[in-house]
């Protein structure tokens, strides 16, 4: 018996809906499986990587640093210190002393075994070397005996704490006496009448004339 137009239309419509429903169901299944797979990738714990422990002998690093630059008769004189640290030794020691007196981070601690931790000289030297030379964090490891992550931490603490301790004196707005003194400094360096950047002049004064 021949199908009439209504039967053919209904079959075609039903078939189209069934294909749409199947496609929708397939899409749901694919999305669910994909989400489940992604969750498994996220939840799967990575293989732990064992970090290599390096015995840096930080005590010997401090002793060597002290004998080289801070002993009564150091290996390297004041001129070499100023060239390498970009400031005078007494200025550097003033910074170290100020940070050590204010912030516990710059104290030298002793662990349960009686072993000394990093000294304030080591921490500040690592920060200054990075600032002075623009070197990578691990470039000072072989001399100061401080690892890369600790050196970055020292730098961050050093910058924050120096600003906190000295900002009232060296980062404040200059008064007339400051302006007069800075003009005299500029004239002494061969730039009469030139004031320049206040912040730059104050930093110069702090690092080189204190």
Image: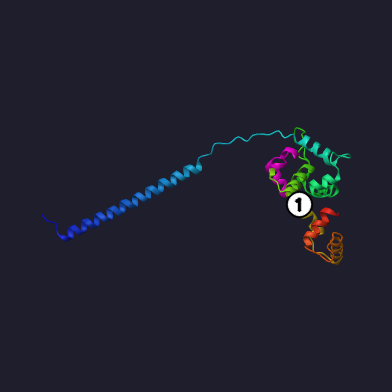
Q: Is residue 43 magenta?
A: no
Residue, far front? 190
Relative depth, front residue between 147 and 46: 147
| Depicted 201 relative to depicted 22: above or below | below
Quarter the N terminus occupies = bottom left
Q: In the picture, which quadrant includes the C terminus?
A: bottom right
| Residue 69 figure quarter | top right
Which residue reaches farthest right?
72
Q: Nearer the viewer, residue 188 or 118?
A: 188
Q: Is residue 78 left or right of residue 128?
A: right
Element assignment for label 1 = helix
Number of disc labels: 1
Rendering colour mode:
rainbow
Residue 205, quarter of picture: bottom right
The region drawn magenta spans 138-156
Q: Which residue is pictured at 71% across the width and 44% down the height?
A: 151
- The residue beneath circle 1 is 161
Q: Point out residue 126 in the picture as x, y percentages from the top left corner.
A: 75, 44
Q: Position of residue 110 (x, y in %)?
A: 77, 37
């Amino acid at each position: 018996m021949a199908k009439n137009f209504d039967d053919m239309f209904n079959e075609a419509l039903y078939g189209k809906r069934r294909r749409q429903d199947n496609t929708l169901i397939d899409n749901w299944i694919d999305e669910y499986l994909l989400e489940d797979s992604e969750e498994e990738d996220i939840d799967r714990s990575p293989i732990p990587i064992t970090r290599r422990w390096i015995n840096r002998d930080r005590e010997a690093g401090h002793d060597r640093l002290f004998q080289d630059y801070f002993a009564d008769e150091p290996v390297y004189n004041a001129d070499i210190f100023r060239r390498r640290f970009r400031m005078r030794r007494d200025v550097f020691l003033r910074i170290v002393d100020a940070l050590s007196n204010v912030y516990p981070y710059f104290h030298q601690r002793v662990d349960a075994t009686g072993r000394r931790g990093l000294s304030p000289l080591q921490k500040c030297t690592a920060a200054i070397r990075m600032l002075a030379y623009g070197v990578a964090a691990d470039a000072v490891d072989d001399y100061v005996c401080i690892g890369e992550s600790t050196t970055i931490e020292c730098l961050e603490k050093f910058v924050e704490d120096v600003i906190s301790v000295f900002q009232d004196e060296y980062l404040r707005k200059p008064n007339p006496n400051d302006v007069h003194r800075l003009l005299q400094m500029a004239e002494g360096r061969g730039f009469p009448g030139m004031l320049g950047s206040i912040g730059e002049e104050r930093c110069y004064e702090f690092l080189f004339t204190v």
